[in-house]
Image (spheres, rainbow, N blue to C red):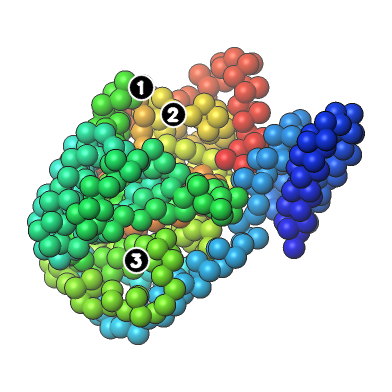
Amino acid sequence: MKNRVVQLLFVFTIAAIILIVLDKSIISLYTLIGILWPITIVGISFVIFIENRSPQSTLAWFLVLAILPIIGVLLYLLFGRSRWRRKKHLQRSEEKRMIFREILAGKSFNLDISSPLSERSTYLTQVIQKFGGGPVANETTTKLLTNGDETFTEIIQAIEDATHHIHIQYYIYRSDEIGTKIRDTLIRKAKSGVIVRFLYDGLGSNKLRSGFLQPMKDAGIEVVEFDSILSPWLLETVNYRNHRKIVIVDGTIGFTGGLNVGDEYLGRSKKFPIWRDSHLKIEGKALYKLQAIFLEDFLYATSRLNAHSWNQFMDRTYFPSQGIHQAEGAVQIVASGPSSDDTSIRNALLKIMGSAKKSIWIATPYFIPDQETLTLLRLSALSGVDVRILYPGKGDSIISDQASQSYFTPLLKAGVSIYTYTDAFMHAKIVLVDDEVASIGTANMDIRSFELNYEIIAVLYESKTVLDIKNDFEQDFKESIKITWESFQKRSIQKRMLESLMRLISPLL
């Protein structure tokens, strides 16, 4: 209701302006703008105020509307509506997803844990599932994939070996050399009889053109766009992007993590000749949840509303539930998005980090934490926990980079160690706690990933891959520069002012 009032005010203002322009009454135009635009701004401010957002977000929007009123209104219409004020399309999204989950819940996939975890790990799996995470699954092997060469080699090999289906989903998919190579591999497999479904985000992959996609469609691949930026629903969807990266082959091999598809992830970018990233290969029972998440997104994007079309995915060819009996530890898949009832990934990460007794190591390319996350990290460091943050030495966004660095001072003061990865971009999204529990996936340590994007992470308990993650961290720390409190305080007053300005608007990022 409140957002509808703001929209009507804005639409009425624009319509009145158009009518006056057509009537060539310039004085009346300025008069109308002078009257109606402040009313619109006041209306938006009132809506923001009574939505009871965080104080930081509320003050940030007030600042933007006060300093840049015209731009502020446009930004609000595109990016400002609260995720809690979900519109009909998000309600439909959740309704469709819920029906799919109910159908899935009626199937037996034997996900019971057959080998015990430690008391701490067992407790975490139970709490995270209550937060909205998937069921924990053992008999699952995982492999850490470091950087683009290793990741794309494994993915292409899995695609080449497919016999029944290939499901592929990316936020960014480029039509460059590696993108074309994977596309052509998918086309060959489709022509050989393998079912291929290709899902891409409408904003992140907006540069994909029909000339690149049509050969896939001609080969029988189901190509689907998630919330096109040309949609009439643009104002309702533009700020809620599908940031997930998922590849599933035959329901037995899956991939997720930080890497999209593009040559820059192979270090072929002039701006970033070194691109540090991490991905995860998964085999075994945990693929049940990964497959379910892909199908939820796919069915939403294709607007298939009837249960009959969904039942086609319920047979064992999509959910074989084949366990790897010699596997150690367990895996739990957690997903969240703007249509979720709660911020499941953020809550899961807070619980995992809050369980730390010895160490919390974080790798993230964007660090814009909410107040609870910032407080937890500070208090953990003050209590003697080894808290470390691995951050890019060279960022890809001036706004988010300066906003991130505005949080460094309170962390450094509390004893948190911050490392910048050489003079290169570090894009991995990993949390490691006490060398026992780790998460790796698509979610950055920022408000956008926690609240606005569709994201996914895999939580690993007591597996060998957790130690591989630790080894990668240790190597990365050796190749990084540790920021000291003394050196950070020497930055210029201009830089401090820029950080402070970006800090003010960081809740909007």
Residue 506 occupies quadrant: top right
Residue indicated by mark 1: 271
The answer to whether mark 3 and mark 2 are in CB contact below 8 A is no
Residue indicated by mark 3: 295
The answer to whether mark 2 and mark 1 are in CB contact below 8 A is yes
Which residue type carries mark 1? Lys
Give the Cα distance between marks 3 and 2: 32 Å
Give the Cα distance between marks 2 and 1: 9 Å
| SS under mark 3 | helix
Residue 32 occupies quadrant: top right
484, 8: nearer the viewer: 8
262, 300: nearer the viewer: 300
Q: Is residue 149 visible?
A: yes
**Residue at the extreme front:** 23
The answer to whether mark 1 and mark 3 are in CB contact below 8 A is no
Residue indicated by mark 2: 396
| SS under mark 1 | loop
Q: In the rendered view, would you say 112 is above or below 369?
A: below
Give the Cα distance between marks 1 and 3: 36 Å
**Residue 11 percent across, percent down from the top left:** 74, 48
Which residue type carries mark 3? Leu
The residue lying at 22 percent from left, 58 percent from top is 220
Which residue type carries mark 2? Asp
